[in-house]
Image: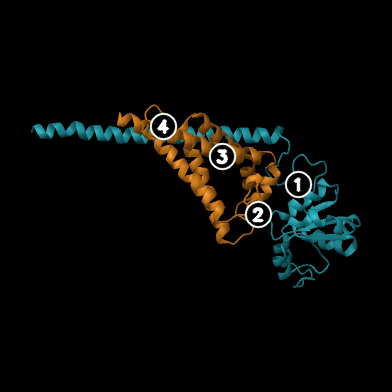
Amino acid sequence: MAKSGAKNLRATLLLLARLVLGGVMAAAGVLKLRDTFSFYIEITHYKLPLPDSLQRFVAITLPWSELVAGVMLIFGIWTRAAALLNLAMTVIFAGVVSSAIARDLNIECGCFGKAGGTKVGLVTLSIDLACLSLALLIYYLAATTKKSR
Amino acid sequence: MILLNSQFPRAEKKDVAKKSKASSFASDAERALWTAGFAIALGFAWNIWGPRPLAIFDDGSVHASGEEPSTPITLEEFAQRLKADDKLLLLDVRDDEDYEKGHYPYALHVPVKLLQEQLPRIAPNLDGASLIVTLCDSELCGMAEEAVERLRKIGYKKVRVLKGGWEAWLRSDLPRIKGKD
């Protein structure tokens, strides 16, 4: 009985985490892909020592990666793989945002395209870290819960 | 002897469990890579058929769908044309702080974030220019491209980015002064 309760709790927690992270990532992707050029400009504001073509590549592909990984989490398709992909993205985001904070760049985050207009700072870093933790939690729960993929 | 025998299956079980976990992670990682590949393909398809394509290589155009390509102007070309054409306008779109550290004495300074709201004030300068050249910190800063994009949207077609930005300017012998004006 207690075992079944714990199992239900884990399943509920997994579902909630999937919906929250999936929703955030899918929304971030949709808002960015409406205007690839503006997103590319946002990326260049980070002044990363990367070739211009690589920054353009990221602007073209990142919104769809977020959208696909988000939708997969929402619908529970390849949950662990989707969690890994989200984890990889959030680790990179956290690194890039931390580097912008360290260099004291006064720039827009660009996390949700032009929507919101949040400046890069501790709030954006906290959101990234929260998403990173959710991705880890989802992977752990999905890997340790039977019948999850 | 009995104890020893019973330990082998346990060790084997642990080994099998470890291997299974590792192969499960490898399979998840492989699926994640497939998903990323799928998303990248979608991204490129969207970039070809979507509303605002972006060139993957900087071919000098602001974006692939631009009706009139805008090749970045090199500093050498800019310097030559500056001598011959007094209607050439340099639009410095860097922040106040960077501008005050050093700028071209005849530049029009409008930070890119204020470009939209300052347009009524600077419109006469823009209208009278034979070519508007936008400048920001460096090749990577992106603000000059953003300014070009915004100006093109409202109808200014003769707009180009200064290749290399202020970093390139500093390597040249073109005039520069410090301060607000």
The amino acid sitting under disc 3 is Met
Residue B23 in the image: state x and y as whole percent: 37, 33
Residue B104 in the image: state x and y as whole percent: 79, 67
Q: Please, which residue is most extreme toward the top here?
A: A147
Disc 3 marks which residue? A25
What chain is colored orange?
A: A
Question: Mark 2 and mark 1, same subunit?
Answer: no
Up-down relation of residue B21 to residue A120 (above or below):
above
Kind of element beneath mark 3: helix
Foreground tag (2 vs 1): 2
Q: Earlier in the sequence, mark 3 or mark 4?
A: 4
The amino acid sitting under disc 1 is Val
- Foreground residue, B151 or B89? B151
Residue A128 visible? yes
The amino acid sitting under disc 4 is Ala
Which image quarter: residue B174?
bottom right
Kind of element beneath mark 2: helix
Disc 2 marks which residue? A45
Disc 4 marks which residue? A11
Badge 3, how many Cα within 10 Å: few under 14, some, many 20+?
Answer: many
Question: Disc 3 to disc 4, how far (Cα)?
Answer: 21 Å
Foreground tag (1 vs 4): 4
Badge 1, how many Cα within 10 Å: few under 14, some, many 20+?
Answer: many
Question: Mark 3 and mark 1, same subunit?
Answer: no
Question: Disc 2 to disc 1, how far (Cα)?
Answer: 16 Å
